Amino acid sequence: MPVVTTLHTVLQQPRADQRRVMQELISLSTRLVVMAERGRQMLQTIYRAPPAKIDLIPHGIPDVGFVDPTYFKDQFGVEGKVVLLTFGLLSPNKGIEYVLNALPQVLAEFPEVVYIVLGATHPNELREHGEAYRLSLEILAKKNQVDKNVIFYNQFVDLENLKEFIGAADLYITPYLNEAQITSGTLAYTFGAGKAVVSTPYWHAAELLADDRGILVPFADAPAIAREVIGLLRDDTRRHALRKNAYRIGREMIWSNVAQMYMRSFECSRLEVAAPRRSLATKTLDQKPRELPRMKLNHLTRMTDSTGVFQHAVFTVPNFSEGYCTDDNARAFVLAVLLGELGEDPERVRALATTSGAFLHHAFDPKTKRFHNFLGFDRHWLDEQGSEDSQGRALWALGIGVGRSPFRSFQMMAGQLFALALPALTGFTSPRAWAFGLIGIHEYLRRLSGDTLVNQTRETLTSMLMERFEASAHPDWPWFENELSYDNAKLAQALIVSGQGTGQQAVLNRGLEALRWLTRLQMSEKGHFRPIGSNGFYRRGGERANFDQQPVEAQATVSACLEAYRATSELCWYEQAQRAFDWFIGWNDLGLELYSSETGGCRDGLHVDRVNGNQGAESTLAFLLSLAEMRLAQNILTSFKAPIAVAE
């Protein structure tokens, strides 16, 4: 049975017996969860834990609104006061005395300040020393003549009351004296509620409050506490900026997001459990998923320079004269995130993510809030403004960056661009742009589910896509448009993820209905995948084009069918995804491979009599994205199917 161990504390200088216990835990655990980046580093350097075994999942917090503290103050009798707060189990290592020594200087300038210390005495402290520490603090408050401005709540409060105490605070102070604290639940709660925090630089605080998310002061330094508290009370703009930064980052720590991270850790752990003994038994072909090609990035690397991914190739040679485009660099950024989840070479993956992410950032015009699409080899933009569809693809990639990238820098960059680029989408007329945007929103909300504006945009775009379907669909043509052209399956996929995400069964059902019709239409008489050809497409009532078949159509179908499989757990959808993937490797009208195992690239299309020998970026990325998604899905499928076989 897999074991996932959450380490609330990681010791920097363990005794011999503590080290032995930790190393045995590491050995016995399938996954290890830490709550801070420092914990991950310490596990690797001090205890030699395998990096691939470690998941970073932040301390969970309740999801509360960004509320003015004045709203809560009257119930504590501190209306009109400036409230400083410290909470948690009381013990001498908390450093409360240094705040009490700072208060006279604070009160000299801000006499309306009240300092609330919330929390019962720690059970160990109570058992050994009684209330001696609390008493000493009360005596110190009297000695400093601040006792009229200090309130002790000697109680352990429930969550609802705690949220109200936190809500009433203007500043939160953690004056802890011990640097070696890698996780603080009290800090996580108040930070996530959007409070301006002044703290000593213990490990968790040093990491969480970096980059203008809080104020750090030296240990045991009352004058520094006074100076920083006074500075923040003088400067409303800075204080509120700290609050906003903290609240925004805190949305990643809410319990629903943390739960999703744990679910991913559990899924990984299930896949990694080794069999109790070696078995030589094997399965017949119908009992195991198809063996997939290995991931080979050689050609994509050749197609990428320091600017981005080139659009086209002459056979396997990059075509400089055609330059670059946002569409392909968006696809490359998505691929980089998926490769990271698969555990591919971290340096190579990060390099691809950095280059393609930088391209997207450069492509965005902050004046028009639109992306350029085409960039010449001389690094001059060839268009005033990119297409609506390229904007949608960019938002898809940025949403993935926010929702699934493990790197904070990518999350932040992608999140800022996403927020700037999203509003334009509701004014577009292209249903594909809406669809890519909805898929990007779905990914974005994996991490930032409480974003009101993004949720509202999802509702608007979902309604627009549903209305487009109702206006166009007929009993013999249940589709969004009167023509099937390119990236068709993305339209159905957008409704599937939006229906799942919002709990709207009608939206989900409509997406599944449309995809079911499309997959039937794209299956040949011999049972293989036959996408709509780009040499004329297929207008309702007209003649269908069977060639030139494009890799991007196979990729869109793979992705949509896997999403349907995740939504319904119906194995037929996985089989449809496999059928579309097999098109790349020879199960198609001509029986020819489009994927080149020699180069790692993919040929640009299937003509009536041959394959197109050029291996451009769109085609190569279509194959690599399909392979990455199939591998991720196959991992989950294998983990679910194994117990069933045993039971039977």
Image: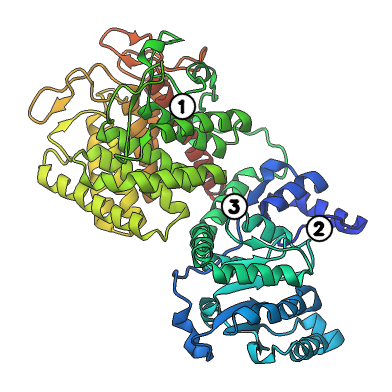
In the rendered image, which quarter is residue 263 located in? bottom right
> Sequence-wise, which precedes: disc 2 or disc 1?
2
Residue denoted by label 2: 11
Image coords of residue 483 (percent x, y): 15, 31
- Label 2 – label 3 distance at C-alpha: 26 Å
How many marks do you count on the picture? 3
- Label 3 – label 1 distance at C-alpha: 36 Å
Residue denoted by label 1: 624
**How many residues crowd mark 1 within 10 Å: few (<14), some (14–19), many (20+)?**
many
Image coords of residue 92 (percent x, y): 80, 78
Q: Nearer the viewer, mark 2 or mark 3?
A: 3
Q: Amino acid at mark 2?
A: Leu
Q: Determine which of the numbered discs, if any, sits on residue 211 in the image.
A: 3
Q: Amino acid at mark 3?
A: Asp
**How many residues crowd mark 2 within 10 Å: few (<14), some (14–19), many (20+)?**
some
> Sequence-wise, which precedes: disc 3 or disc 1?
3
